[in-house]
Protein backbone atom coordinates (compact mmCIF):
# COMPACT_ATOMS: atom_id res chain seq x y z
CA UNK A 1 0.00 0.00 0.00
CA UNK A 2 2.82 2.39 0.90
CA UNK A 3 4.53 2.01 -2.49
CA UNK A 4 1.27 2.58 -4.35
CA UNK A 5 0.55 5.79 -2.41
CA UNK A 6 4.08 7.07 -3.04
CA UNK A 7 3.74 6.16 -6.74
CA UNK A 8 0.49 8.14 -7.06
CA UNK A 9 2.08 11.03 -5.14
CA UNK A 10 5.08 11.14 -7.50
CA UNK A 11 2.96 10.78 -10.65
CA UNK A 12 0.61 13.54 -9.51
CA UNK A 13 3.61 15.74 -8.69
CA UNK A 14 5.14 15.25 -12.13
CA UNK A 15 1.87 15.81 -13.98
CA UNK A 16 0.59 18.75 -11.92
CA UNK A 17 3.54 20.60 -10.43
CA UNK A 18 5.39 20.85 -13.76
CA UNK A 19 2.56 22.80 -15.44
CA UNK A 20 2.14 24.86 -12.27
CA UNK A 21 5.76 26.05 -12.50
CA UNK A 22 5.74 26.50 -16.28
CA UNK A 23 2.56 28.60 -16.38
CA UNK A 24 4.39 31.76 -15.30
CA UNK A 25 7.12 31.28 -17.91
CA UNK A 26 4.51 30.69 -20.62
CA UNK A 27 2.65 33.81 -19.50
CA UNK A 28 5.80 35.89 -19.81
CA UNK A 29 6.40 34.54 -23.30
CA UNK A 30 2.80 35.38 -24.22
CA UNK A 31 3.30 38.96 -23.08
CA UNK A 32 6.48 39.29 -25.11
CA UNK A 33 4.68 37.91 -28.18
CA UNK A 34 1.52 39.99 -27.50
CA UNK A 35 -0.48 36.74 -27.64
CA UNK A 36 -3.70 37.00 -25.61
CA UNK A 37 -4.74 33.41 -26.40
CA UNK A 38 -1.48 31.96 -25.10
CA UNK A 39 -1.75 34.07 -21.93
CA UNK A 40 -5.31 32.83 -21.41
CA UNK A 41 -4.19 29.22 -21.92
CA UNK A 42 -1.38 29.74 -19.39
CA UNK A 43 -3.93 31.15 -16.94
CA UNK A 44 -6.26 28.16 -17.37
CA UNK A 45 -3.38 25.66 -17.05
CA UNK A 46 -2.01 27.45 -14.00
CA UNK A 47 -5.43 27.60 -12.34
CA UNK A 48 -6.09 23.89 -12.87
CA UNK A 49 -2.57 22.85 -11.87
CA UNK A 50 -2.79 24.94 -8.70
CA UNK A 51 -6.12 23.39 -7.77
CA UNK A 52 -4.90 19.91 -8.75
CA UNK A 53 -1.76 20.23 -6.68
CA UNK A 54 -3.96 19.64 -3.64
CA UNK A 55 -4.01 16.01 -4.85
CA UNK A 56 -0.21 15.99 -4.62
CA UNK A 57 -0.39 17.27 -1.05
CA UNK A 58 -3.06 14.76 -0.04
CA UNK A 59 -1.15 11.78 -1.40
CA UNK A 60 2.07 13.12 0.13
CA UNK A 61 0.36 13.35 3.51
CA UNK A 62 -1.09 9.87 3.04
CA UNK A 63 2.37 8.54 2.12
CA UNK A 64 3.79 9.90 5.37
CA UNK A 65 0.81 8.60 7.34
CA UNK A 66 1.23 5.02 6.08
CA UNK A 67 5.04 5.13 6.29
CA UNK A 68 6.80 3.10 8.93
CA UNK A 69 9.98 5.20 8.60
CA UNK A 70 8.78 8.81 8.53
CA UNK A 71 6.34 10.93 10.53
CA UNK A 72 4.99 14.44 10.23
CA UNK A 73 7.64 15.43 12.78
CA UNK A 74 10.52 14.35 10.50
CA UNK A 75 12.44 17.56 9.63
CA UNK A 76 12.61 17.05 5.86
CA UNK A 77 8.86 16.39 5.81
CA UNK A 78 8.18 19.61 7.74
CA UNK A 79 10.50 21.67 5.52
CA UNK A 80 9.16 20.31 2.24
CA UNK A 81 5.54 20.67 3.41
CA UNK A 82 6.19 24.28 4.39
CA UNK A 83 7.82 24.99 1.04
CA UNK A 84 4.85 23.39 -0.72
CA UNK A 85 2.50 25.77 1.12
CA UNK A 86 4.71 28.68 0.01
CA UNK A 87 4.57 27.35 -3.57
CA UNK A 88 0.77 27.25 -3.45
CA UNK A 89 0.72 30.76 -2.03
CA UNK A 90 2.91 32.10 -4.84
CA UNK A 91 0.84 30.29 -7.45
CA UNK A 92 -2.66 30.99 -6.15
CA UNK A 93 -1.83 34.38 -4.67
CA UNK A 94 0.21 35.89 -7.48
CA UNK A 95 0.94 33.82 -10.60
CA UNK A 96 -2.61 32.78 -11.51
CA UNK A 97 -4.17 36.24 -10.90
CA UNK A 98 -1.30 37.87 -12.83
CA UNK A 99 -1.87 35.50 -15.74
CA UNK A 100 -5.56 36.40 -15.76
CA UNK A 101 -4.65 40.10 -15.76
CA UNK A 102 -2.11 39.61 -18.56
CA UNK A 103 -4.65 37.79 -20.71
CA UNK A 104 -7.21 40.53 -20.13
CA UNK A 105 -4.72 43.34 -20.88
CA UNK A 106 -3.47 41.60 -24.02
CA UNK A 107 -7.03 41.05 -25.23
CA UNK A 108 -7.87 44.72 -24.65
CA UNK A 109 -4.62 45.74 -26.31
CA UNK A 110 -5.37 43.71 -29.44
CA UNK A 111 -8.85 45.27 -29.64
CA UNK A 112 -7.39 48.77 -29.24
CA UNK A 113 -4.55 48.05 -31.68
CA UNK A 114 -7.08 47.53 -34.45
CA UNK A 115 -8.23 51.13 -33.94
CA UNK A 116 -5.20 52.91 -32.58
CA UNK A 117 -1.61 52.32 -31.44
CA UNK A 118 -1.50 51.38 -27.72
CA UNK A 119 0.22 53.92 -25.51
CA UNK A 120 3.59 53.51 -23.80
CA UNK A 121 2.05 53.26 -20.34
CA UNK A 122 0.20 50.09 -21.32
CA UNK A 123 3.38 48.63 -22.80
CA UNK A 124 5.24 49.37 -19.56
CA UNK A 125 2.49 47.75 -17.47
CA UNK A 126 2.62 44.60 -19.56
CA UNK A 127 6.41 44.52 -19.50
CA UNK A 128 6.48 44.92 -15.71
CA UNK A 129 3.81 42.23 -15.35
CA UNK A 130 5.88 39.90 -17.54
CA UNK A 131 8.97 40.53 -15.42
CA UNK A 132 7.07 39.82 -12.20
CA UNK A 133 5.62 36.65 -13.73
CA UNK A 134 9.12 35.51 -14.61
CA UNK A 135 10.23 36.21 -11.04
CA UNK A 136 7.30 34.26 -9.57
CA UNK A 137 7.93 31.38 -11.99
CA UNK A 138 11.64 31.38 -11.11
CA UNK A 139 10.83 31.33 -7.40
CA UNK A 140 8.39 28.46 -7.97
CA UNK A 141 11.05 26.56 -9.89
CA UNK A 142 13.60 26.98 -7.09
CA UNK A 143 11.06 25.90 -4.45
CA UNK A 144 10.18 22.77 -6.43
CA UNK A 145 13.88 21.95 -6.89
CA UNK A 146 14.52 22.26 -3.14
CA UNK A 147 11.49 20.08 -2.37
CA UNK A 148 12.73 17.40 -4.80
CA UNK A 149 16.21 17.46 -3.26
CA UNK A 150 14.70 17.11 0.22
CA UNK A 151 12.54 14.19 -0.86
CA UNK A 152 15.36 12.39 -2.62
CA UNK A 153 18.12 12.83 -0.03
CA UNK A 154 15.87 13.01 3.06
CA UNK A 155 18.34 14.91 5.24
CA UNK A 156 17.82 15.72 8.92
CA UNK A 157 16.38 12.42 10.04
CA UNK A 158 16.14 9.83 7.36
Image (cartoon, rainbow, N blue to C red):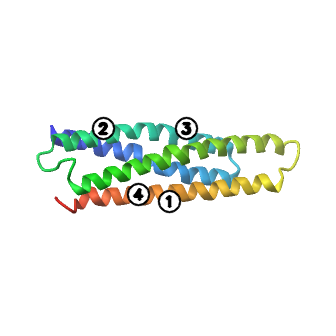
Is 14 on the left or on the right of 65, as rendered?
right
The residue at 40%/57% (across/down) is: 143
Q: Are marks 4 and 2 in contact (CB under 8 Å)?
A: no
Tell me how far mark 1 sits from mark 2, CA to CA. 25 Å
The residue at 52%/48% (across/down) is: 23
Q: Quadrant of residue 131?
A: bottom right
- Specify which label sits upstream in the sequence, 4 or 1: 1
Residue on which disc 1 sits: 138
Is 113 on the left or on the right of 87, as rendered?
right
Where's the N terminus, which quadrant?
top left
Q: Position of residue 117 (x, y in %)?
A: 86, 50
Graded by Cα atoms within 10 Å as few (under 14), some (14 to 19) or many (20 or more), the crowding at tag 4 reads some
- Specify which label sits upstream in the sequence, 1 or 3: 3
Q: Are marks 4 and 1 in contact (CB under 8 Å)?
A: no
Graded by Cα atoms within 10 Å as few (under 14), some (14 to 19) or many (20 or more), the crowding at tag 2 reads few
Label 4 SS: helix
Graded by Cα atoms within 10 Å as few (under 14), some (14 to 19) or many (20 or more), the crowding at tag 1 reads some
Residue on which disc 2 sits: 58
Residue 80's place in the image compared with 5, above or below, is: below
Graded by Cα atoms within 10 Å as few (under 14), some (14 to 19) or many (20 or more), the crowding at tag 3 reads some
Residue on which disc 3 sits: 44
- Name the mark on residue 90: none
Q: Are marks 1 and 2 in contact (CB under 8 Å)?
A: no
Q: Position of residue 52 (x, y in %)?
A: 41, 37
Residue on which disc 4 sits: 143
The extreme front residue here reads: 73
Between circles 3 and 4, the one closer to the viewer is 4
The residue at 22%/62% (across/down) is: 155
- Specify which label sits upstream in the sequence, 1 or 2: 2
- Specify which label sits upstream in the sequence, 4 or 2: 2
The extreme left residue here reads: 68
Amino acid sequence: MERFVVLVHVLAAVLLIGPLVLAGFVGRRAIRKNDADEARQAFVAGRWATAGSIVVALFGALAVAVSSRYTFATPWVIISSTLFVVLLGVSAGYTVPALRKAARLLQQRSAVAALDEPDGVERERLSALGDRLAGAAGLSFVIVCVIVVLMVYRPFGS
